[in-house]
Amino acid sequence: MTHALPRILCALALLFAGCRPFVPATPGSFTELNDQDDFDYRAVSAEGVVLGAKAHKNDPRVDLAFAEKSLEQRLRSSGYALIEKREIKTRSGLSGRQFRLGHDESSNPHLYYVTLFVTDDYVYILEAGGTKEQMLRYGAPIDWHVEHFQVR
């Protein structure tokens, strides 16, 4: 089987069955949700911490620096406070950036992590969110989810 054949099969599957251009990694403490309109992938913990992933065609073509600056401006204008920005590398070698942000909902602190990967074909956005307490408790599974993310 050539290297092009799996891509061709996935492209055909995208047309007919909604094949994702990535392989999500669902931590053991989460369950994947089906039929999520705004996400290509969504999972939730029993306590309500949510993971999500989206893939957007990289057209018009952007690089990681452009996508990073655009995302950061959008998040800040939406009321999120940037706590930390870090470089991320998956186990498969994909490099990206992660934003760790905070905001309050009804005076209850929440954390929101957004991880950005850019390839020639797609821009991938991974999200994790929940109350500050829950996000800190689920730190290891959230990190595992990002580290084991793979593109097709």
Image (cartoon, grey):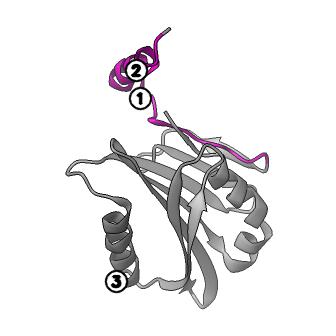
Q: Residues within 10 Å of mark 3 (few under 14, many from 20)?
A: few
Above-or-below relation of 105 to 10: below
- Of the pair 26 and 11, the residue shown nearer to us: 11
The residues colored magenta run 2-28
Left or right of 55, for residue 107 = right
The residue labelled by disc 3 is 77
Disc 1 vs disc 2: Cβ atoms closer than 8 Å? yes
- Of the pair 38 and 145, the residue shown nearer to us: 145
Position of residue 90 measured from the top left corner of the image (x, y, whole percent): 61, 51
Q: Which residue in the rendered view is the most extreme toward the left?
A: 60
Q: Which residue in the rendered view is the most extreme toward the top?
A: 1
Position of residue 81 measured from the top left corner of the image (x, y, whole percent): 49, 87
Instruction: Tell me where residue 72 sits by quadrant.
Output: bottom left
- Secondary structure, mark 3, is helix
Residue 61: in magenta span: no
- Secondary structure, mark 2, is helix
Above-or-below relation of 29 to 129: above
Position of residue 129 measured from the top left corner of the image (x, y, whole percent): 60, 67
Amino acid at dot 2? Ala
Instruction: Tell me where residue 109 sits by quadrant.
Output: bottom right
The residue labelled by disc 1 is 18
Instruction: Identify the mark nearer the N-term, 3 or 1.
Output: 1
The residue labelled by disc 2 is 13
Disc 3 vs disc 1: Cβ atoms closer than 8 Å? no
Q: CA distance from mark 3 to mark 1?
A: 32 Å
Amino acid at dot 3? Ser
